[in-house]
């Protein structure tokens, strides 16, 4: 190997390693709480207190979520545990960064949404160029057969090279790719007169994420959408359960009647189970599942597991008398299961069926539903499902 290739390879490796180091530094903390290095000053006991930020969110009953409008709180919760989702972004709240990047026309620091848009534009242009090349090769072969009576291989040049581009050889042209997404031109002298961009994005937390931050970590305060007063833990407990009961305003009274099969409780059991095991839990609606499990987070690697939450009633009478229609509570068909498994197998995810056993009301009194102490009566069982591929699994 030449010295030039070694130098270019080392530069590329240095840039890649520096990016990974910066990403690891920014997302170093798995939860919002930071535990500093302990200092032992008295009888060998640590006097260092954990740093627990107190973020603020507003409950929204229509979307069944909690909104964080403060950009500092939104960035903190995303970088420390990947909580929530930007309502104007694919995942990380980056709408303001995209707008600033488009206005300044730097084109250097792309956000995840811009990278995805660029790749899609390149893929679209590649398909168009390949279709044109295939049509031209077919026309050339037909002309040669009609005029000269000879048969030629379409898409093959006389020297044996391929005329039709492939994904490995095709290179995008900057004009074709950037024409669809080029930002507005701004003259250098006009930048000072442009009105500053107001951040219109907020971080949207699911009810499961919000309750985990409130109850398990005690780093989030939720406000009433009308009075702007902070909820107590008991009020949050009741309000989140009532969110699945049709109502125009959040109800602070206890659910009537309280039930073990409340959709919020069933989904939170699964969310808390995997969060407590160290996984980063995100919504899996994109892949037709309930949750996706990331080992470290979306910025490091793709999700490894796809979770389908399946409620199981300990007493069938509770299901017959329930006002709720829980998803996947009824026996599913094999075609549905095969479809879900195939979708996730194609994206290199292992499908897990997570069975949440709902305690029977005849065994456990519903009065225990007045607090999160009822979680101890639920159980979680997991079944790993993998698609059998004969060509790959013969050994």
Image (tube, grey):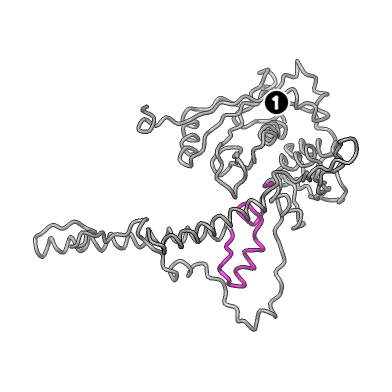
Toward the viewer: 350 or 57? 350
Per the image, the residue denoted by label 1 is 322
Does residue 328 appear to the left or right of 125 in the view shown? right
Q: Position of residue 255 (x, y in %)?
A: 80, 32
Toward the viewer: 123 or 58? 123
Residue located 68% across and 48% down the image: 28
Q: On the image, which quarter does residue 245 sit in?
A: top right
Q: Residue furthest top?
A: 363
On whether residue 340 falls in the magenta region, the answer is no
Type of secondary structure dominating the magenta stretch: loop
> Is 20 located above or below residue 316 in the figure?
below
Circle 1 crowding by C-alpha within 10 Å: few under 14, some 14–19, many from 20: some
Q: Position of residue 168 (x, y in %)?
A: 36, 56
Q: Position of residue 58 (x, y in %)?
A: 79, 50
SS class, disc 1: loop
- Split into 4 quadrants, where in the image is the N terminus? bottom left
Toward the viewer: 101 or 310? 101
On whether residue 92 falls in the magenta region, the answer is yes
Residue located 60% across and 69% down the image: 102
State which region is magenta.
Answer: 82-111
């Amino acid at each position: 190997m030449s010295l030039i290739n070694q130098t270019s390879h080392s530069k590329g490796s240095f840039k890649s390693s520096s990016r990974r180091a910066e990403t690891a530094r920014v997302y170093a903390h798995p939860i919002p709480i930071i535990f500093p290095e302990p200092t032992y000053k008295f009888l060998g006991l640590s006097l260092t207190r954990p740093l627990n930020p107190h973020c603020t969110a507003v409950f929204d009953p229509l979307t069944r979520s909690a909104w964080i409008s403060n950009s500092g709180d939104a960035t903190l919760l995303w970088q420390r545990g990947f909580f929530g989702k930007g309502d104007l972004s694919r995942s990380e709240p980056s709408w303001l960064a995209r707008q600033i990047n488009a206005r300044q026309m730097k084109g250097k620091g792309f956000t995840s949404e811009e990278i995805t848009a660029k790749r899609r534009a390149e893929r679209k242009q590649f398909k168009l160029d390949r279709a044109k090349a295939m049509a031209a090769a077919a026309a050339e072969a037909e002309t040669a057969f009609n005029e000269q009576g000879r048969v030629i291989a379409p898409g093959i040049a006389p020297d044996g090279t391929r005329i039709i581009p492939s994904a490995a050889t095709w290179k995008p042209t900057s004009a074709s790719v950037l024409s669809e997404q080029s930002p507005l031109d701004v003259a250098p002298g006009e930048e000072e007169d442009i009105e500053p961009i107001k951040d219109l994005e907020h971080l949207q937390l699911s009810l499961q994420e919000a309750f985990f931050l409130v109850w398990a970590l005690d780093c989030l305060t939720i406000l009433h959408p009308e009075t702007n007063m902070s909820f107590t833990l008991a009020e949050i407990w009741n309000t989140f359960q009532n969110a699945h009961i049709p109502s125009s305003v959040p109800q602070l009274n206890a659910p009537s009647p309280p039930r073990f099969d409340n959709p919020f409780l069933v989904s939170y059991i699964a969310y808390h189970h995997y969060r407590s095991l160290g996984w980063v839990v995100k919504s899996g609606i994109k892949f037709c599942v309930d949750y996706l499990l990331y080992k470290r987070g979306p910025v490091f690697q793709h999700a490894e597991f796809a979770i389908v939450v399946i409620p199981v009633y300990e007493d069938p009478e509770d299901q017959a008398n329930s006002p709720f229609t829980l998803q996947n509570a009824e026996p599913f068909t094999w075609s549905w299961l095969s479809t879900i498994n195939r979708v996730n197998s194609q994206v290199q995810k292992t499908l897990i069926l997570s069975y949440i056993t709902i305690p029977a009301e005849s065994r456990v009194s519903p009065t225990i539903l007045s607090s999160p102490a009822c979680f101890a009566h639920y159980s979680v069982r997991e079944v790993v499902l993998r698609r059998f591929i004969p060509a790959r699994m013969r050994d």
